[in-house]
Amino acid sequence: MKKAFTMLELIFVIVVMGIIIAVVTPNTRSNPLQEAAVQLASHIRYTQHLAMMDDRFNPNKTHSSGDAYVAANSPIWYRERWQLAFYSNAYTDGAEAYTIFSDTVNNSTGNAQASEIAKNPENSAQIMTGGYGSANAIDYNDPEFIGMKKLNIGKTYGVTSVDLEGGCANSRLSFDHLGRPLQGDHATMTGPYSAGTQRLITSDCTITLSDATDSIVLHIEPETGFVSVAF
């Protein structure tokens, strides 16, 4: 009676098993574009969470000297809502990146400063920007950069373009205290929901991430701000 496999038989079994595994095992190779989309969806939800937990309503927060949009001493608390802004400039090394911040400094200028940017909940020494401005801390190219390099989705994941369309045809997405999504630069608003500066999203918002070969679309629903990813 034969009691053992020959070496040839063992090799044949190994080869067959390798072929079967290659055929039936799902493709588990990483897809950088998908990783970027999942990360962005998570950070949009986090921005909404910050807005709901950190209600910026403060009628005593006023613009002391007035500007092109509001009269002197008018409330401007609504300009400080948490937002996620996309940028591609010299401070992102020319790549697509985003920043999560609350515009609290200097009567809300519309531009992020390091002190306004959300801290990384997993590492408080980092702030949530992939590059934004000339200050060392928020310049992706600077050795003193304290942002999160993975938020520079161009450099990290190869994303070549970010297109916001539909209800949020702009480079920014923000949320009010109820978690409702808004669009646009709040520094130009004349009131929280005033006529002419209505920023609440009223139709589906789509954010399309593209690389050299493919695209993935994120959907943000009006009112609820629910985020989904279409792979």
Image: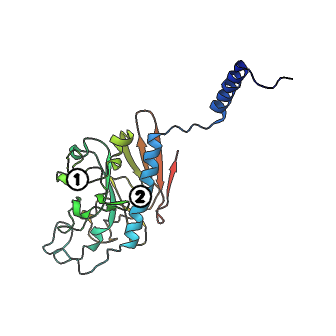
Residue furthest toward the bottom?
Answer: 60
Q: What element carries label 2?
A: helix
- Badge 2 or badge 1: first in the primary sequence: 2
8 left or right of 155?
right
Colour convention of the picture: rainbow
Residue 195: x %, y % from top left: 33, 69
Disc 1: CA contacts within 10 A as few (<14), some (14-19) or many (>=20): many
Q: What's the CA distance linking mark 2 and mark 1?
A: 20 Å
Residue 189: x %, y % from top left: 27, 66
Q: What element carries label 1?
A: helix
| Residue 147 seen in render | yes
Looking at the image, is 46 positioned above or below residue 88?
A: below
181 left or right of 171?
right
Residue 138: x %, y % from top left: 22, 53
Q: Do the residues labelled 2 and 1 touch (CB within 8 Å)?
A: no
Viewer-nearest of discs 2 and 1: 1
Return the residue nearer the eye: 85 or 74: 85
Residue type beneath disc 2: Ile
Residue 138, numbered label? 1
1 left or right of 76?
right
Residue furthest toward the left?
Answer: 65
Tell me where residue 68 sits by quadrant.
bottom left
Return the residue nearer the eye: 218 or 21: 21
Q: Name the residue under label 2.
A: 44
